Image (tube, grey):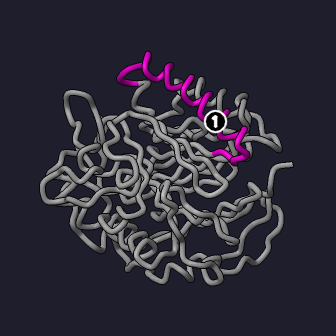
Amino acid sequence: MRRNRLVAGTSSVLLGVAGLWAFTLAASGGNSAAEVPEPTAAVAPSRTLSSGDITSRGGGVRIAAVGDMNGPANLAADSHSGRNGAAISALVRNNQVDAFLGLGDFQYDTGYCDDYVKYWTRLWGGTKPKLYWVSAPNHDWQPGRNEDLDNFMNGQCPGAPAKAAINQQRGLIGNGTPYSKDFGKWHIAFLSSAQWQYNPAQARALTAWLDRDLAAAKAAGRHLAVVHHDPYFTSDTSEHGRSTELKPWIDVMWKHRVRFTLSGSQHNYERSCPVNNADQCVSDGITAFQVSTGGIGLRSFTSSPTYIVKRFSDTHGFLRMTLRDDGSFVWGFVPTSGPGKDAGSRPAPR
């Protein structure tokens, strides 16, 4: 069982989140910079279609993402978790994001209904109206041990009737069940990497599902992204190395030229070069973001893969992205405590 120590907060949260997005973005490749205006200022309010798919406006689809969120029995608004939860909840409340992607490990050490209701809901419940989630092994979901996350996200835990956005649209989604969704011109698949640990046969079956799902979306003209908890393109820490068992999924992502992935687990922040399934930096590769800075104690790195181009382990915060209709995207890490920064853009595919 992985156990993690919550680091108490020492500085106040910067709740001017709109201003935090007005950063200088590095151009693709990170060699030059260009000033990018705050993207929500000239964008019409989001509108949800009857199908539940998010409309893409001229400014693109706006998302926030982070994993590894709240420590055991933590209710402190001034904790790292509390600051992130407040900042993302403000973005949701003020319609400054179209979706919050929860990258797993919502509540430590073990997520039962009572823990989600008493603790996570207090600090992060404001994100639920735009929450799209994946379950992670052990802390979120372990068969026969803790299996409440799916009920919680569907509003079935006593005391927390609110449903996550995806559950409002689809109903109950079982722990480990894959799903995908169109966000404007983008198609994002959500996969529980826990299946490789608990049911490898099911994980292999999900490889075929992912292949079909991405192929259909690509044929429909969508740009592709994938969300999963355990990272493949990552530096080692004292607790975890790369999740090599995910290689079949990575092969499928490379086959269909997935533009980016989002994962968590490591308790730090990393971004890869556009990378292929052989760990090579290539122009049409996958940009892998590993964002596990939601509030749990941070871990230092113990290896230095050549495909990792930006990383830090001294800062809590979350990732914001804008996904453009042409397949280009911009990103910025929003620190809520610590000095770490990352911002950049990737052009449309050729």
Question: In the figure, is residue 130 to the left or right of 186?
Answer: left
Residue at the spot 47% in from the left edge and 65% down from the top edge: 317
Relative to 347, is 179 above or below? above
Verify whether residue 199 appears in magenta: yes
Q: Is residue 166 visible?
A: yes
Verify whether residue 240 appears in magenta: no
Dominant secondary structure (helix, strand or loop) of the stretch shown in magenta: helix
Question: In the figure, is residue 90 to the left or right of 271?
Answer: left
Corner quadrant of residue 226: top right
Count how many numbered circles sit on residues in the image: 1
Q: Is residue 296 visible?
A: no
Toward the viewer: 229 or 13? 229
Residue at the spot 72% in from the left edge and 70% down from the top edge: 25
Which amino acid, mark 1? Leu
Query: Which quadrant does the N terminus fall into?
Result: top left
Toward the viewer: 185 or 228? 185
Helix, strand or loop status at disc 1: helix
Corner quadrant of residue 201: top left
- Position of residue 251 measured from the top left corner of the image (x, y, whole percent): 66, 27
Corner quadrant of residue 213: top right
Q: Which residue is mark 1?
A: 214
Q: Which stretch appears magenta?
A: 197-224
